[in-house]
Image (cartoon, coloured by chain):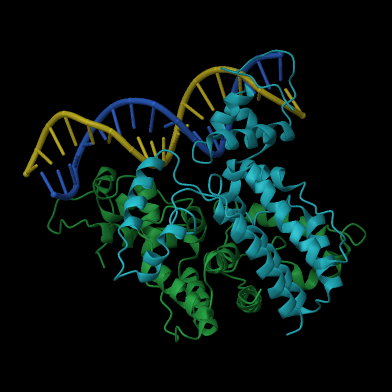
Chain colours: A green, B cyan, C yellow, D blue
Amino acid sequence: MQSVKRGRPHQDSERTLTQDSILDQAVALIDEVGLEKFSVRALAQRLGVFPGAIYWHLPTRNMVLAGSVNHCLKDVEPLADPSDWKAWLTELLHEYRAIVRRHPNIAPLIVTQLISNAGANFKLVDTILDVLTRAGFQGEKLYHAYDIVITAKVGFVTMEHAALPAEEAESWTEVMKTTIAGLDETGYPNIYKHRAGLANRHFILRWENGVTNPLDASFEAHVYATIEGLRMLLTR
Amino acid sequence: MQSVKRGRPHQDSERTLTQDSILDQAVALIDEVGLEKFSVRALAQRLGVFPGAIYWHLPTRNMVLAGSVNHCLKDVEPLADPSDWKAWLTELLHEYRAIVRRHPNIAPLIVTQLISNAGANFKLVDTILDVLTRAGFQGEKLYHAYDIVITAKVGFVTMEHAALPAEEAESWTEVMKTTIAGLDETGYPNIYKHRAGLANRHFILRWENGVTNPLDASFEAHVYATIEGLRMLLTR
DNA sequence: ACCTGAACACCGTTCAAGT
DNA sequence: ACCTGAACACCGTTCAAGT
């Protein structure tokens, strides 16, 4: 925890701007204002320093963002018995979703920077491989199961919490409401028939995201289907 | 197809700057230079107009980006028999991946703007609902299956093609190579054991993405697991 | 209706200079 | 080693003015 300065830079006592304190505030800033309004300059002001100061600790804006993602995700670790692979994976997916729901604004970054994860949680990666091996996966099939777990973990939840452009949210909302309301019975019979259950609740047909309209039941079905799919893959 | 102007704005004959021609060039620009170097100003220069001209047709940068995504995805439509839901969904996922592989740089946008899809392919949404209904899904379970299909379609492929920051790619690569090479046997026994098969091939442990290192076999397993998971969900 | 031309308020990043 | 202060080369967006 770092004390937050308001206003312009200072020259006083506590001169410890560390990588960790920067990322703490970066995550807090993204939580508060969203990704679109995040800037290195705004982060500097929040820390009470000049923008250049941040670049001494983290050399680019992308490093700050990647660091923020890892900062949020570093504590993911299921506690279930690793020999019960179904229970363990179920808990993994739920715990991951809980973390994203605490920091929904970073959701898009997780996908974007899934390849730039030099600071990733490799202990978790190793445990996933361990659990899948105990489940019986081996050879190439182990790698396929691993990729399926990673994408199942990240995909649903990040999409569930994808957000409208911050500044223009209400105009987007208006357009989408009328667009979806205008899908008629002859052109779109299935959407029309289920419009009460689908509109503003499920993917593509919604204008609010998982922050206000969580897809709890769908997520639970997703977890179930993922595990059953893996079980089928195991004995293919 | 629109003829492309080089250099600064003009004042000559063909004065038809349409929404479609703008999006054509926006997609082309993103394909060429990537999302990080995309700008409205660069797009304007490519079209041979002043930046302000674009804003007459598309009122914000976000509209240009959302339009570009829809422009790429509007032609997705499987041809398989819709009464064979497994074959139809399999083709859907494969066709979707083929399109993303033609425009890999838009991958991150698909997730980000999955909620701002007023111009989405609603005919496809309706057909997915139709196919799932024929498969036997009904009530809430239909909506769960629908959400699973959407996320299975988008999640894996977008993550497969997530890219390193354009400008700093080679420095990231270097860091990741050494980081992964440094995961020792005692701390990370499973990663270490499978390092030959995993390194630079599978999620989190790679430094190249699906453009150069496609995850064909994993994707095929993902499709299989998704369908089998849905089949299990159907009879739960 | 559609576009120009120029302006405004921001960015990320760099770097000499200070301590 | 760490940060200041100011600069550079960009942005998205707006808007009077032209045609």
- Position of residue B122 in the picture relative to residue B171 (left or right): right
The answer to whether residue B13 is above or below residue B133 is: above
Instruction: Place residue B62 in its image quadrant.
Output: top right
Q: Decide which of A31, B198 is in the foreground and name it.
A: B198
Q: Quadrant of residue B182?
A: bottom left
In x, y percent, where is residue B233? Answer: 72, 79
From where the camera sits, is residue A121 visible?
no
Q: Quadrant of the N terminus of chain B?
A: top right
| Picture residue at 62% right of the left edge, 71% below the top | A213
In the rendering, at what x and y percent does residue A16 appear? 17, 58
Between A137 and A131, the one lying in front of the other is A137
Q: Position of residue B72 (x, y in %)?
A: 70, 44
**Apparent side of residue A173 relative to residue B194 in the rendered image (left or right):** right
Q: Which quarter shows the C terminus of chain B?
A: bottom right
Up/down of A88 relative to B130, above or below? below
Total marks drawn? 0
Residue A46 in the image: x percent, y percent? 31, 55
Tell me the residue at 80%/52% (across/down): B77
The residue lying at 63 percent from left, 79 percent from top is: A224
In this rendering, the answer to whether B57 lies above or below A73 is above
- Residue pictured at 41% horizontal, 76% vertical: A77
Out of A135 and A180, give the one closest to the viewer. A135
* Residue B103 appears in the picture as rendered: yes
Q: Would you say A235 lies left or right of B184 here?
A: right
Furthest toward the right, the residue is A186
